[in-house]
Image (cartoon, grey):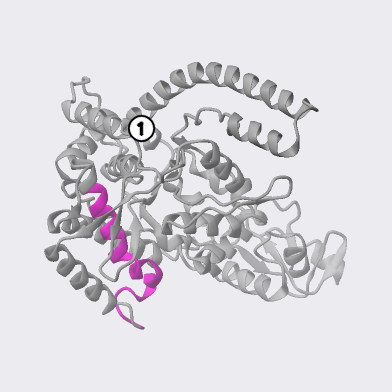
């Protein structure tokens, strides 16, 4: 019987079906809600690179959040202050020019980084001289045997603290570990951006590996909340870094995005509810050649953002890189608008209601709106002391677009954990080097997300249902061992 199973006749299975439904068309991104500075800038970026409007808008808005987040927090009506920091994820296929759009929006950041780098070179020379003099004087005091303890302590106090190197010039980092991000926050500016036009390198990298994903997600969530970063290292021990702000923008391809937003660990931990996601329609087929034109709106954006980034950050007295941002309170009109929007969302969160499928994100929609409104307000007037109804209304319009995007992704099953596990198994199976696979091989050798028989059976059932695995009646030989439960792998 086994020989007959192994020598199964060639066959042509029916084509397998995709694990997820096709995404319905995206709604148009509300570019006008970005206001008189960011809206025209987003359209100018689109004019220059011909990427989808949502891609350009996310890039411009993310840079604006990075620029203003260190200056003020927004006070929510229930008394909790929140950073103006925002986490953006832009999903687009390769070739949609998302990297080009991001480069245009990040131009003022890169210009400021270049200036800071040039300044730091000169400051490092002065620091090295001061450090050498401090070291020499300290050694002299410690070696002077004529000094008693009290005299030595007095001399060391007069010497003062050890000179510190100038702050690192980086404003953004593309794919750090949490420990690396903590080191940059300790040695550099207290307001940073995690920006990557190859977000797959971050999502698939060390920081988001199976062993480190929960730690990374928890740290990113804490920074989003305005909490202190508390890294613990084997060599240098624990550290405490309050007063830091982080904004994030990851540009990812759909297959990578599916791994991120369908990850059950991240769903449960809560990081996904903090992400402002867009997945716009492709612009391919519409990007016909046009002569480059002057784009004054883009020049105004760059000048304004560079000016904000050049402004000194508010720091806690006695520190060099611990933020002390002021509070941006809501006007009475904005407060009423915010509470009405929050109640409107809450009514739709119950079982079977319109937003129940994306309850975690929708529950934070009002807070997202306040953050976005604060960014729009501060980028227009960095000295603003309050968040008005007009800017909050724009923030609400923007977050409503993100609600529709999350609903689209949810409807296509991208956010279902069991589909995410089945997808990972399918990707792994495409590289399996035998025609048959057994259940034991799946949970012993397969993806990390499938490490027991229950999870393996669930994923196999989904792949069977969609035609990617065909049950071998009577079993099959897998890796030289007969398995009663085995399936033929369908490859495309």
At horizontal 23% and vertical 50% (from top left) the residue drawn is 29
On the image, numbered disc 1 is attached to which residue? 106
Residue 175 x, y percent position in the rendering = 54, 41
Asked if residue 469 shows in the view, the reply is yes
Above or below, 194 against 462 in this view is: above
Helix, strand or loop at disc 1? loop
270 horizontally vs 403: left or right: right
Considering depth in this image, is 175 or 374 the residue closer to the camera?
374
Magenta region? 351-376
Write down the quadrant of residue 362 in the picture. Answer: bottom left
Write down the quadrant of residue 275 in the picture. Answer: bottom left
Considering depth in this image, is 397 or 471 the residue closer to the camera?
397
Write down the quadrant of residue 137 in the picture. Answer: top right
Residue 218 x, y percent position in the rendering = 54, 59
Chief SS of the magenta region: helix
367 horizontally vs 95: left or right: left
Considering depth in this image, is 280 or 220 the residue closer to the camera?
220
Above or below, 452 against 376 in this view is: below
Above or below, 294 against 74 in this view is: above
**Quarter the N terminus occupies:** bottom right
At horizontal 59% and vertical 17% (from top left) the residue drawn is 129
Residue 6 x, y percent position in the rendering = 81, 62
């Amino acid at each position: 019987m086994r020989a007959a199973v192994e020598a199964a006749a060639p066959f042509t299975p029916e084509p397998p079906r995709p694990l997820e439904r096709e995404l319905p068309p995206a709604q148009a991104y509300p570019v006008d809600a970005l206001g008189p500075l960011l809206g025209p800038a987003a359209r100018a970026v689109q004019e220059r690179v011909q990427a989808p409007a949502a891609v350009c808008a996310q890039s411009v808005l993310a840079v604006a959040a990075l620029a203003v987040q260190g200056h003020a927090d927004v006070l929510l009506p229930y008394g909790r202050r929140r950073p103006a920091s925002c986490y953006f994820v832009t999903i687009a296929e390769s070739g949609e020019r998302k990297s080009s759009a991001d480069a245009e929006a990040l131009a003022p950041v890169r210009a400021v980084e270049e200036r800071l780098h040039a300044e730091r070179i000169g400051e490092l020379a002065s620091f090295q001289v001061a450090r050498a003099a401090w070291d020499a004087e300290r050694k002299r005091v410690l070696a002077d045997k004529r000094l008693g303890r009290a005299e030595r302590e007095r001399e060391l106090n007069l010497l003062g603290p050890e000179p510190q190197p100038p702050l690192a010039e980086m404003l953004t980092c593309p794919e750090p570990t949490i420990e690396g991000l903590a080191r940059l926050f300790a040695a550099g500016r207290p307001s940073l951006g995690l920006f990557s036009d190859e977000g797959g390198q971050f999502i698939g990298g060390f920081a988001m590996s199976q062993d480190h994903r929960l730690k990374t997600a928890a740290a990113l969530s804490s920074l989003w909340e305005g909490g202190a970063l508390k890294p613990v290292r084997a060599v240098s021990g624990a550290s405490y870094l309050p007063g830091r702000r982080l904004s994030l923008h990851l540009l990812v391809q759909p297959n990578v995005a599916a791994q991120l937003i369908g990850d059950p660990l991240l769903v449960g931990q809560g990081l996904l509810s903090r992400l402002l996601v867009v997945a716009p329609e492709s612009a391919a087929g519409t990007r016909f050649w046009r002569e480059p034109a002057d784009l004054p709106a883009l020049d105004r954006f760059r000048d304004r953002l560079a000016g904000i980034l050049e402004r000194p950050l508010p720091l806690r007295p006695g520190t060099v890189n611990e933020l002390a941002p002021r509070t941006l309170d809501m006007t009475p009109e904005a407060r009423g608008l915010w509470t009405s929007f929050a109640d409107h969302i809450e009514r739709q969160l119950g079982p079977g209601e319109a937003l129940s499928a994306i309850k975690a994100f929708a529950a934070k929609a009002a807070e997202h709106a306040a953050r976005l409104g604060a960014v729009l307000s501060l980028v227009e007037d960095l000295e603003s002391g309050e968040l008005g109804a007009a800017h909050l209304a724009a923030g609400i319009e923007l977050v409503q677009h993100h609600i529709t995007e999350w609903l689209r992704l949810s409807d296509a099953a991208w956010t279902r954990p069991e589909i995410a596990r089945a997808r990972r198994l399918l990707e792994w199976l495409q590289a399996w080097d035998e025609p048959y696979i057994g259940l034991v091989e799946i949970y012993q050798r397969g993806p990390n997300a499938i490490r027991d028989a229950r999870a393996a059976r669930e994923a196999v059932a989904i792949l069977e249902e969609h035609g990617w695995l065909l049950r071998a009646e009577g079993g099959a030989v897998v890796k030289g061992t007969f398995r009663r439960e085995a399936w033929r792998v369908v490859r495309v």
